[in-house]
Structures are given as C-alpha cells and as structure tokens.
Image (cartoon, grey):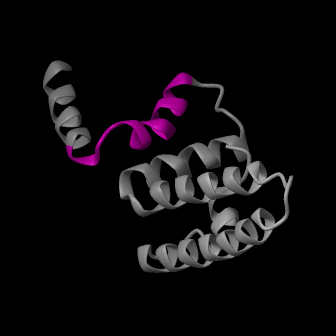
Amino acid sequence: MSQDFYELLRVSQNASTKEIRQAFRERIAQLVRRLHSAQQHPGADTSTLKAQQQNIHEAMQVLIDPQRRRSYNIFRQLSEQGMPDDLKKLWSVIKPAIVDPKVNSSIEVLSKFTKL
C-alpha cells in the first residue's frame, strides 16, 4: 500500500459507505477519461493509469467492508504511531483488527472461566 486509501479516494476517515462509493465512481471516471485520452496516442504508456485504477478499486473494496475497514484503520494508526513495546498492549491494539467482535466476547467469557 503506497498511498492512504482515504487520500486515494479523497474522502474523510468518517465517510459513509455511500460517500465512498460516490468518490470511487468519480475517481474511476476521471481515470477512464485519462486512460482513453492516453490510448489515442500511439506508444503512450498507460501502465501507471491502470495501476492507479487497481489501487482505487482496492481502496473502495477495503473501505466499504466494515471488518476490513476496521482492520485497515487499526494498522494505519499503528503505522503512524509506531508499534507498542509491550506485547499485551500490542495485542490489545491489534485484537480488534484480527478477531471478530462477536467472537471476541465469547473469548473473554471463556478466558474468565479458565482463570478460575
């Protein structure tokens, strides 16, 4: 991931799914116009535009899925702030990105019984 997905789609971190889809359509339309224009010139290199199109599509797929978006946000925050030194603190930070919240509550209940 070379660019932040929110920046790539030009949306805020609080953007709704509807806003993300709209931004995706606008960005893809821009790229398609540029790609079409570039293809009109013989020998034009369109690989960069095609790569941008793939990145925009990936960004949209991640940000419209609640679980993937939560994971992305957590790892994005970690990359900005740095990794915690303590393993327990690291686990508490990355656990929401890895473990489904429904499963997490079951794990916490089971862990209480195993500590008895």
Taking the spot 72% from the left edge, 52% from the top edge, the residue there is 3
Q: How many marks?
A: 0
Residue 108, given in percent of the width and then of the height, sits at: 23, 35
Where 13 falls versus 1 (above or below)?
Answer: below
- Residue 32 visible in rendering: yes
Query: Residue 98 in magenta?
Result: yes
Taking the spot 21% from the left edge, 32% from the top edge, the residue there is 107
Residue 46, given in percent of the width and then of the height, sits at: 77, 54
Query: Residue 54 in magenta?
Result: no
Where 115 falls versus 27 (above or below)?
Answer: above
Where 16 falls versus 72 (above or below)?
Answer: below
* The N terminus lies in quadrant: top right
Residue 5, given in percent of the width and then of the height, sits at: 63, 58
Residue 54, given in percent of the width and then of the height, sits at: 60, 52
Where 107 falls versus 18 (above or below)?
Answer: above
Taking the spot 53% from the left edge, 32% from the top edge, the residue there is 89
**In the displayed image of the protein, which residue is found farthest to the front?**
42
Q: Nearer the viewer, residue 63 or 101?
A: 63
| Principal secondary structure, stretch drawn in magenta | helix
Quadrant of residue 39 within the rendered picture:
bottom right
Residue numbers of the magenta segment: 87-102
Q: Nearer the viewer, residue 63 or 36?
A: 36
- Residue 116 visible in rendering: no
In the picture, measured across the screen, residue 1 lies left or right of residue 111, that is right
Q: Nearer the viewer, residue 53 or 6?
A: 53
* The C terminus lies in quadrant: top left
In the picture, measured across the screen, residue 21 lies left or right of residue 76, that is left
In the picture, measured across the screen, residue 18 lies left or right of residue 84, that is left
Taking the spot 33% from the left edge, 37% from the top edge, the residue there is 99
